[in-house]
Image (spheres, rainbow, N blue to C red):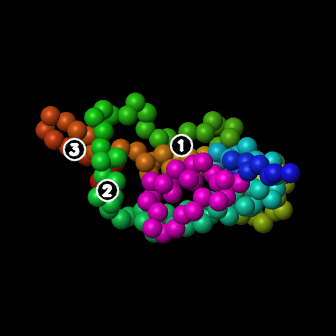
Amino acid sequence: MATTLTSECNLLAVPFSAATDFTDLAEYCDRVATTLIECRDPALKTALCGRLNTCLALLRPTLNEPIPPHLIDGFITNDLPDVSPGFEPDAGSLCDYCLALTQILNGHALLPETETTLTGLLCELVWYFAADLNAPRWIRTADGIQVIDGRPA
């Protein structure tokens, strides 16, 4: 009987290293978070969290580095994006996130509902982070290429 690899297993097999472009790492984080939020298998959740942690740890030291020359064209746009990445959870979710973090900081044991809430927080933060990393930084204008207001160059 042949084993069929699921998309989750494929995600766990994606190779990456410190040499991987930050844009690829950010997209991978986004895909893992999307899978993680829908995952019901505790062992798979643990594996996905481990991969996400490793990927984020590789991204962290690169955040203040200039964009590599071979990626710059991907950050130039002809039109301003209609929507900027935003972190805008609804009030109920935001309150739940704060309550869950308070419980952890106070050293309480994790309830299943708290684990679910923290998974939601982690995923929303990762999606925001990945979208922000891959957002355009420059716009082509009649006066040449300009920095988009509010974006790091």
SS at mark 1? loop
Q: Nearer the viewer, mark 3 or mark 2?
A: 2
Give amino acid for label 1.
Answer: Phe
Residue on which the image places disc 1: 87
Give amino acid for label 3.
Answer: Gln
Q: Is residue 119 visible?
A: no
| In this view, 128 is above or below 20 | above
Mark pair 3, 1: CA separation: 25 Å
Q: Is residue 148 left or right of residue 145?
A: right
Q: Is residue 65 left or right of residue 120?
A: left
Residue on which the image places disc 2: 70
Q: Nearer the viewer, mark 1 or mark 2?
A: 2
Q: Which mark is residue 52?
A: none
Q: Does the segment drawn in magenta span residue 86?
A: no
Q: Nearer the viewer, mark 3 or mark 1?
A: 3
Magenta segment boundaries in residue numbering: 9-32
| Residue 135 in which image quadrant | top left
